[in-house]
Amino acid sequence: MIFIEDNNFIEIDNVENLGLKIDIGCGRKKQEGFIGIDSSPYSTADYILDLNLDKLPFEDNSVDYVYSSHCLEHLDNLEHIVSEIYRVCKHNAQVFITVPYYNTSANLANIYHNNNIAFNEHTFRFFSSEEDCDIPKDDWVTPSCQTWGLKYSANSDMNIELRTQKIEFLYFPEYNNMTEEKKRMSRKKYNNVVEIINYYMIVIKNTENKIKKESLIIEPQSETIRKQHDYIQAQRKILDERYEMILKLQQEMILKDEYIHKQSILLDERYNLIIKLQENKE
């Protein structure tokens, strides 16, 4: 599936039709059709590696798609794994990473997470040299960093170039219905606003042949299913609210009908009383 905009999915060149696909930190939920890599012997991975030190078991420029879910926050050496992802990926390969957003109480307290790495809007700016990007500027611009790429901010070059095409924020329920501006302001000011952050990135190796901005993003099936589930739940909530409204209107109509019926009976009684009084008078 290709995700175009909220709740709209167009079935074109999906993940299944890609070449070599790898799932880094697959645990026991390896993505179907992917080669799984993990550090745990209890996982269902095809390769067990030390992701902080070992090289990925693939040739240079051989991988088409990288998927990683809730793995990178456990590592001590982010630069190493990103460098390895870059090495094995082809030019234009796509990378999807989902991790806990940095400033949630559960994430900060988690002894299994490396909280020296903050996964937020800025994380992958340090793997890019581009001045601009497709991410709304209000999400990332700061007074001291007016351009997107911060790759050379430490006067060094790690020989990695990733283009962040899209960032998704998975909000705690109480923030879901806010406007984007209010969400953004809340995200910047408070903890426990965003639970998970998703990054959609493109590997850039041929800088002379950069990807067009309108390039479509291939979304992993797990995210498509999650979004479809969220959309169904949202539609169900709307239907439930409308059903409740209809029941309320029906109840109001029943009460009105009962009131009209009682008034009608009262008028009939008064009319009959008047007729009776007139007859007695005669």
Image (spheres, rainbow, N blue to C red):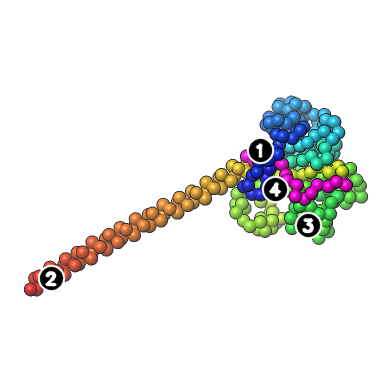
Residue labelled with disc 4: 168
Q: How many marks?
A: 4
Query: Of helix, strand and loop, which mostly describes the magenta segment?
Result: loop
Q: Quick check: can you spot residue 42?
A: yes
Residue labelled with disc 2: 277
Most extreme residue toward the bottom is 281
Viewer-nearest of labels 1 and 2? Answer: 1
Give the x, y percent position of residue 249: 41, 56
Q: Given the image, on which type of amino acid does mark 2 rest?
A: Leu
Most extreme residue toward the front is 12
For label 2, count other residues whose C-alpha is less than 10 Å away and answer few (under 14), some (14-19) or many (20+).
few
Dot 1 or dot 4: first in sequence order is: 4
As measured in the structure, the alpha-carbon distance from the residue carrying label 3 to the one carrying label 2 is: 87 Å
Dot 3 or dot 2: first in sequence order is: 3
For label 4, count other residues whose C-alpha is less than 10 Å away and answer few (under 14), some (14-19) or many (20+).
some
Q: Nearer the viewer, residue 10 or 271?
A: 10
State yes or no: discs 4 and 2 in contact (Cβ < 8 Å).
Answer: no
Q: Nearer the viewer, residue 160 or 48?
A: 160
Q: Which residues are magenta?
A: 207-225
Q: Given the image, on which type of amino acid does mark 1 rest?
A: Ser
State yes or no: discs 1 and 4 in contact (Cβ < 8 Å).
Answer: no
Residue labelled with disc 1: 222
**SS at circle 1:** helix
Residue labelled with disc 3: 141
As measured in the structure, the alpha-carbon distance from the residue carrying label 4 to the one carrying label 2 is: 80 Å
Q: Given the image, on which type of amino acid does mark 3 rest?
A: Val
Dot 1 or dot 2: first in sequence order is: 1
